[in-house]
Image (cartoon, rainbow, N blue to C red):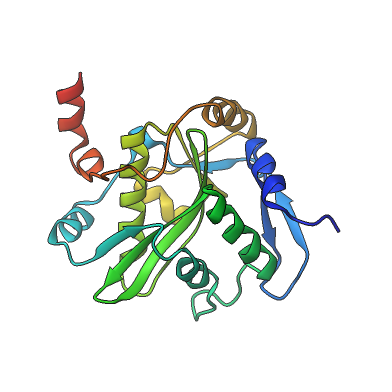
Amino acid sequence: MTKITPDLLIEAYKIGVFPMANNQDDPKIDFFDPDPRGIIPLENFHISRSLRKLIRKGIFKVTYNAAFSSILEGCSRISRNRPTTWINHEIKTVYKQLFDMGYCHSIEIWCGKSIVGGLYGVSIGAAFFGESMFSLKPNASKVALVHLVASLKQEGFVLLDSQFPNKHLVQFGAIDITREDYKSRLSFAVNGEAKFPARSPDLYYVLEPEHFKTQTS
């Protein structure tokens, strides 16, 4: 069995494949290249009115890359709604290495002194590959996704990969595209230049997109 290394993973993402284990106890890791592929077009990202109101209330505190290991553990935690997970020990180890190298990132959602949700993913060039998210309080992962997209748009990312088609993400504008279309977008994106997160993340980029377009047109 080929050992999964950070360099191998980076090259895999660049050609459109990503790793998953069958479950948390299975040491074997397979690579996937789904067709169709799920993406969230950044220019068509949609936020419901209720989520906008929740975000403007400022109930949650949001940080970036401040507690990556906690987010990784949260995403791999077994629960009633998640009886198994594809994140095994080897995946945890190699993604922590990717984080140390600056390729992997997390967004943490806090309520008081506790992390109540978040997400993590990988950035290469102007592409961001969403890996996993979790919520311990309603809407926490949704808030993390909004902050992710705001930072991606602010910094000029052009591709947000959500991997497999996902009905949950359709509410945000997620679509399915062919593998061929995805590979074309991917080739352009990974050769771009963008940095995550934005130095001063601003939700204006997603909460007021029409006004932003008017101001910059």
Residue occupying image coordinates x 27% and y 45%: 201
Q: Quadrant of residue 108?
A: bottom left
Which quadrant is the N terminus positioned in? Answer: bottom right
Give above or below for 180 relative to 62: above
Give the percent coordinates (x, y) of residue 212: 19, 31
Residue occupying image coordinates x 21% and y 26%: 213
Give the percent coordinates (x, y) of residue 120: 47, 57
Residue occupying image coordinates x 76% and y 69%: 27
Q: Is residue 94 left or right of residue 189?
A: right
Between 164 and 208, which is closer to the camera in this rendering? Answer: 208
Residue at the bottom extreme of this rendering: 80
Q: Is residue 23 left or right of residue 104?
A: right
Which quadrant is the C terminus positioned in? Answer: top left
Between 150 and 7, which is closer to the camera in this rendering? Answer: 7
Q: Is residue 52 left or right of residue 103?
A: left
Give the percent coordinates (x, y) of residue 118: 39, 63
Residue at the front extreme of this rendering: 100
